[in-house]
Amino acid sequence: MTAIVEAIGLGKTFPVDGTGVEALCDVNLKVETGEFLALMGPSGSGKSTLLHILGAMDTPTRGEVRLGGSVVSRMTEGERTRLRCRGIGFVFQTFNLLPTLNALENVEIALRFAHVRRMDRIDRAHELLEGMGLGKRLTHLPRHLSGGERQRVAIARALANRPSLLLADEPTGNLDSCTGDAVLDLLRRLNEEGQTIVMVTHDTAVADRAGRIVRMKDGKLY
């Protein structure tokens, strides 16, 4: 299989009180196309830092990231922004929906940043939300949706531009176990349909739903 994203010798040091705190140390990781990978470890292990660097939201202090043959860590900020907009989808623990926009508008806005025509944006957002079982909730604001519904809207938004890579940071962290299971079922279905997913979690039961688990501790893979 072909690697969709690869980390090579990644290191990340954060300055704290005049000294450096090492969040990642010589991380090497390859994610294959169509894989569902779980990055598992306790809080502070470096898994979210690694996810943000893989998703071009942050840059490493050392090493490089390759996505689809391009060296992401050498891109300009503008190039990374375009890459995030068109090639990578993000799902967060806190949903990150815009509170003044309804479900349809929250998905459509991702396409607006990609300069997709308005009617095509609406059609795509409608299609995705229907597929998430939210066809009757299109005009509801986030505060009128349950936690599981908000996370499904967030996943639909992440998929709007047909990204090659979907990154999920503790996607069930703010959900009860039943709702969390439903979200994991959805991610599993998306993966079975061909979507590549990297998911961060500290929960063994959540990680077990992925196809492969990579464990982290103190900024290292083991």
Image: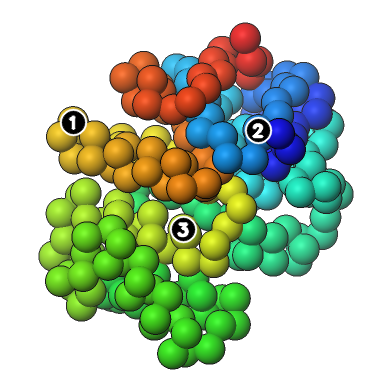
Q: At numbered mark 3, what does the secondary structure look like: helix, strand or loop? A: helix
Is residue 98 positioned above or below 199 on the image?
Answer: below
Measured Cα–Cα span from mark 3 to mark 1? 22 Å
Q: Which residue carries the number 3 mark? A: 158
**Residue type highlighted by circle 2:** Val
Seen from the viewer's position, the closer of residues 158 and 135 is 135
Q: Residue at x 70, y 29 (%)?
A: 30
Q: Which residue carries the number 1 mark? A: 177
Residue 99 at least partly seen: no
Measured Cα–Cα span from mark 2 to mark 3? 19 Å
Residue 206 locus on image (x, y percent)? 34, 25
Q: Is residue 175 left or right of residue 115?
A: left
Q: Which residue carries the number 2 mark? A: 31
Whether residues under marks 3 and 1 lie with C-beta atoms below 8 angstroms apart, the answer is no
Q: At numbered mark 2, what does the secondary structure look like: helix, strand or loop? A: strand
Residue 186: quadrant of the picture: top left
Quarter of the figure that contains the N terminus = top right
Residue 218 locus on image (x, y percent)? 60, 14
Q: Exactly how many numbered labels are in the figure?
A: 3
Residue 85: quadrant of the picture: bottom right
**Residue type highlighted by circle 1:** Ser
The residue furthest top is 222
Residue 193 at least partly seen: yes
**Residue type highlighted by circle 3:** Ala
Q: At numbered mark 1, what does the secondary structure look like: helix, strand or loop? A: helix
Q: Residue at x 37, y 26 (%)?
A: 209
For marks 2 and 1, the one nearer the N-term is 2
Is residue 2 positioned above or below 195 on the image?
Answer: above
Residue 196 locus on image (x, y percent)? 55, 43
